[in-house]
Image (cartoon, helix red, strand yellow):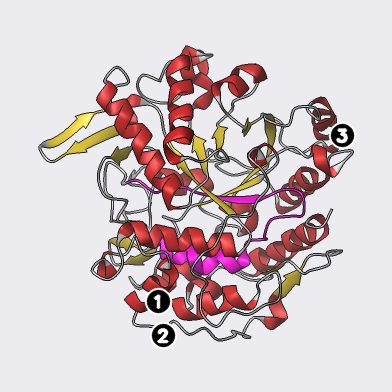
């Protein structure tokens, strides 16, 4: 594997690897308040302003707003992840970005979600002085039905049904440049650019057996937790991603592992046993030789020691951030636990609408500031919608379950323009930036 995958990506798009300052967004640069060096990002925007950029100008922009103020004429050969220790995930802000929803949609085809996510990187606030911001990408594996295609707005095309032991999703990689840069190196280029931006990166996955298919040359099999070969494939898929630079795994339905509280289980199919999940998480860490992986569980709350002993670092709690004092009290409760803590939900993947901009901003404020000491901060969980508001007639859950194009002419640019809220979304994005500006140097 070529170490400098960013250069490979540029060459794949027939671009020069020499980098130049991109000053087109100088008036939209936000900076952290109170740091000796400025943490910078682009805000007061709608996403189409960045998604419409040429990939070279996007990478130029990433280099232009580097934290240290140093401009690199070429992308460095070696980029390390921001170092917040092995248990960084216990304190992080997790921002799930639906890379399928922002993919290039031309007529009924869908691709390049990871390329477009690179274009959005300048608009994600970098990590803080004491805790990391971590991007969780919604899709990395092919979805079972309709991968590589968008469908009408009411047709199901769920991101929660995946195929493993095969290529990565056609929704997120670019097959047009596959002869010049592999799928794996496209993903690594994203990880390297995110790390350069001062961000951690992870991915969402599922554990419900009937939502997973295993692909062989001879055909597909339904996943079975009693089939050790399937379990090994599951582990190795995660290890491959960790070796590309990913460092967090968000586990859907984690609360119910081992049959726990299954009266509220909404997934489809059997779940791994508790010892089995302990083994899986241990093996991912061992085989990748990474001790700093963050495993995060959906609704892994209540019996907190159960999830910590499973190997998790964090999980979404039912606490939303509406009540500042409640979150501060929960922070005080967990201040002596430096390995695991439940997190504050601003919004989750099942959100179907109803939160106002004001309520959302209040929740983000709580997530960033509700503690006695910054070293006791709880993790938090946000969605694309919390940074870049979606158009009024869709929602986070809608774009997880379906993959519509909002293009009015069948072309990608129109989809970028119409997926998100416009003037009100821009104003909201600026207010989110003001909150992060005051939090990053605490």
The single residue placed furthest to the right in the displayed view is: 372
Q: Residue at x 28, y 21 (%)?
A: 228
Quarter residue 174 falls in: bottom left
Asked whether the viewer can see residue 265, the reply is no
Are circles 1 and 2 on residues that touch, CB within 8 Å?
Answer: yes
Residue on which disc 1 sits: 10
Residue 325 circle label? 3
From the viewer's perspective, tell me whether residue 169 is left or right of residue 219.
right
- Say which of 203 and 404 sits in front: 203
Near mark 3 (Cα within 10 A), the count class, few <14, some 14-19 or many ≥20, is few
Near mark 2 (Cα within 10 A), the count class, few <14, some 14-19 or many ≥20, is few
Tell which tag, 2 or 3, sits nearer the viewer. 2
Residue 16 circle label? 2
Q: Is residue 352 magenta?
A: no
Start-end of magenta stretch: 114-141
- Residue 3 location (% of width, % of height): 42, 64
Between the residue at mark 2 and the residue at mark 3, the CA separation in whole angstroms equals: 52 Å
- Sequence-earlier tag: 1 or 2: 1
Between the residue at mark 1 and the residue at mark 2, the CA separation in whole angstroms equals: 7 Å
Between the residue at mark 3 and the residue at mark 1, the CA separation in whole angstroms equals: 48 Å
Near mark 1 (Cα within 10 A), the count class, few <14, some 14-19 or many ≥20, is some
Q: Is residue 133 magenta?
A: yes
């Amino acid at each position: 594997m070529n170490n400098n995958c960013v250069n490979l990506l540029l060459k794949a798009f027939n671009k020069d690897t020499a980098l130049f300052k991109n000053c087109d967004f100088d008036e939209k640069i936000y900076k952290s308040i109170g740091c000796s060096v400025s943490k910078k990002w682009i805000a007061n925007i709608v996403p189409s302003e960045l998604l419409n950029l040429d990939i070279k100008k996007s990478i130029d922009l990433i280099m232009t707003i580097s934290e240290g103020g140093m401009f690199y004429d070429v992308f460095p050969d070696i980029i390390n992840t921001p170092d917040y220790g092995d248990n960084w995930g216990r304190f992080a802000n997790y921002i799930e970005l639906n890379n399928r929803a922002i993919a290039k949609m031309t007529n009924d085809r869908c691709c390049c979600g990871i390329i477009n996510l690179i274009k959005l990187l300048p608009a994600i606030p970098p990590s803080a002085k004491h805790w990391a911001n971590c991007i969780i990408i919604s899709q990395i594996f092919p979805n079972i039905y309709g991968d590589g295609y968008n469908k009408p707005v009411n047709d199901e095309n769920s991101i929660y049904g995946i195929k493993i032991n095969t290529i990565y999703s056609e929704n997120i990689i670019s097959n047009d440049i596959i002869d010049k840069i592999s799928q794996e190196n496209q993903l690594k280029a994203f990880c390297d650019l995110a790390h350069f931006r001062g961000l951690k990166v992870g991915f969402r996955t599922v554990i419900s057996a009937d939502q997973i298919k295993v692909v062989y040359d001879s055909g597909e099999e339904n996943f079975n937790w009693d089939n050790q070969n399937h379990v090994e494939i599951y582990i190795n898929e995660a290890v491959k991603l960790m070796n590309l630079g990913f460092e967090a795994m968000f586990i859907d339905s984690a609360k119910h592992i081992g049959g726990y509280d299954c009266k509220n289980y909404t997934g489809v199919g059997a779940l791994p046993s508790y010892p089995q999940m302990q083994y899986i998480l241990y093996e991912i860490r061992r085989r990748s030789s990474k001790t700093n992986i963050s495993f995060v569980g959906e609704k892994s709350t209540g019996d907190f020691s159960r999830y910590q002993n499973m190997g998790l670092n964090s999980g979404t709690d039912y606490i939303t951030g509406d009540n500042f004092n409640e979150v501060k009290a929960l922070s005080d409760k967990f201040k002596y636990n430096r390995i695991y803590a439940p997190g504050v939900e601003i919004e989750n993947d099942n959100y179907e609408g109803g939160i106002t901009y004001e309520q959302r901003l209040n929740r983000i404020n709580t997530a960033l500031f509700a503690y006695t000491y910054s070293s006791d901060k709880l993790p938090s969980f946000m969605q694309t919608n919390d940074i870049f508001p979606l158009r009024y007639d869709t929602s986070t859950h809608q774009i997880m379950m379906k993959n519509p194009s909002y293009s009015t002419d069948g072309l990608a640019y129109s989809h970028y323009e119409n997926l998100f809220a416009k003037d009100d979304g821009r104003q909201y994005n600026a207010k989110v930036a003001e909150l992060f500006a005051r939090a990053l140097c605490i």
